Amino acid sequence: MRKKLLALIIALAMVFGLTACGSKELTTIGTVPDDISVNLTIAVCGDVMAHMPQLKSALQSDGSYDFNENYDLVRDIMQGADLCMANIECTFPGPDAEYTGYPAFKTPDSLATALANAGVDVGIFANNHMNDSGLSGAKRTRQVIEGAGLYCVGCRESEDQNRSIVVPVEVGGETVNVGIVAYTYETSRGDTNRTMNGGAMSKDAPKFYNSFRQFADTSVLDRDINAIKDEIAWCQERSDITIVYLHWGEEYQRHSNARQQYIAGAIAESRPDAIIASHPHVLQEISYVNSVPVYYSIGNYISNQCEETLDNHYTEQGLIAMLNFKLSKSPVNDGKYVIAAAGSTPNLDTEELTEPGATISGFDVYGTREECEAEEAYNKKLLKIFAKAPAKEEMSWDSWTPLRVDMLEAKACPTWVHREYSGGKFKYKIVPLLEKGYSKRADGALDDIVDLIGEEFIWNSK
């Protein structure tokens, strides 16, 4: 708009021949900087689970647990993103607790450290297993996640804390603020006897858990959806990008159901930048709802669920949602753009133009840029040059518009869990399926994923 306005003023001046000094040529004092552009990549990983065979795999001879090797093959992808998130679907009740897998996931704290080492920046803790160690265990889990150096969203320790978070990300010399809203489904249907995963929650738990009742009638569900939309609005007021994570759907179903689609449509009305979800333990489709990309399920990131344990090879397959943003911001003029007739440049080091009608070095000042942009200015037959000069020739562009999202490329990196028995225990590694050739089973997994989500959503690391 700024450059178009300048071009219009210059063109009119040449037509009417009525510049301030009688010249038909105009020159500009100072230049308008180009828009500042930055690129930002956000990676979101699916369900990080810890079944008993995984705990045995991580157990070391000294009694400690080490999960680091699980992420060796995807470490570069996770660390290469500007912001990486993962859903931590277990609890950290502490070393005095008995570590267990399904149905109540109680996991060593070192898993949080391994995720941090792998490149995770945000631990999403909003899932149907967040109550596996009770409310006190959930609060301790948040503490462990934050103690590992991660942000945590989905559970709060006190009612003074916000339910959602805004994470500042430094990229390209700019700070991009990313708002994150994370909610999980409950199994309860009303306002009393609240349950998570079929187990009773304490009466205070809803104050601290971000949850919604996906099985309730629409009057209850809509109330919960509105609470989620309020959180989206809270983030949008404070951030440049807003991501919504949801834990929902039916287990082992490879396509979204009507209730998921209803929730997605309602939340997309708030225009978050993306909705990313999991819980079914298999992948589901990716589609656009009201121009918002919705990843209905990005599946398991790592677990012991596989062909051998569940007779379901789809549980071995996952996605890393890869959101590639292009953002920009523009300089704000603030009335400091100076237009002068050629050969009559004012000495801005010693003289300052402040009042309409002032004359300096033969240059007439008629008004500010704001006055120039007023509609009535364009209705006059006589051209006037409106300008306001700063006290020095070098323009100071210290005021900019907020960052805006110019483009979002929604892609996904397919993954597969390699489970192999060696040395008396199973070993687990997450394999990025960037191309075929790792193994016949991995190649089949890649074919399954492409058939489900479509080639257009497959991320290219190059």
Image (cartoon, helix red, strand yellow):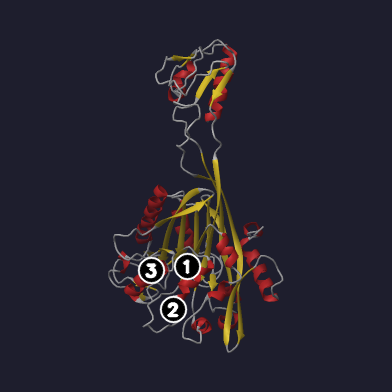
Q: Quadrant of residue 125?
A: bottom left
| Residue type pointed to by label 3 | Arg
Choose mark 3 or mark 1, whichever is in front. Answer: 3
Q: Which mark is residue 108?
A: 2
Secondary structure under tag 2 reads: loop
Residue 2 position (above or below residue 57): above
Look at discs 2 and 1 and give the one toward the viewer. 2
Residue nearer the viewer, 129 or 186 = 129
Res. 110 in view: yes
Q: Which mark is residue 87?
A: 1
Q: x, y percentage for residue 111? A: 47, 74
Lower position in the chain sequence, tag 2 or tag 1: 1
Which label is found at residue 122?
Answer: none
Q: Which residue is depicted at the point 39% across and 81% down?
A: 95
Tell me whether circle 2 and circle 1 mark residues in contact (CB < 8 Å): no
Residue annotated with mark 3: 142
Among numbered discs 3 and 2, the one appearing first in the sequence: 2
Q: Position of residue 386 (x, y in %)?
A: 47, 20
Answer few, some or many: residues within 10 Å of disc 3's Cα (few below 14, many 20 plus, some between 14 and 19). Answer: many
Measure the C-alpha gap from mark 3 to mark 1: 12 Å
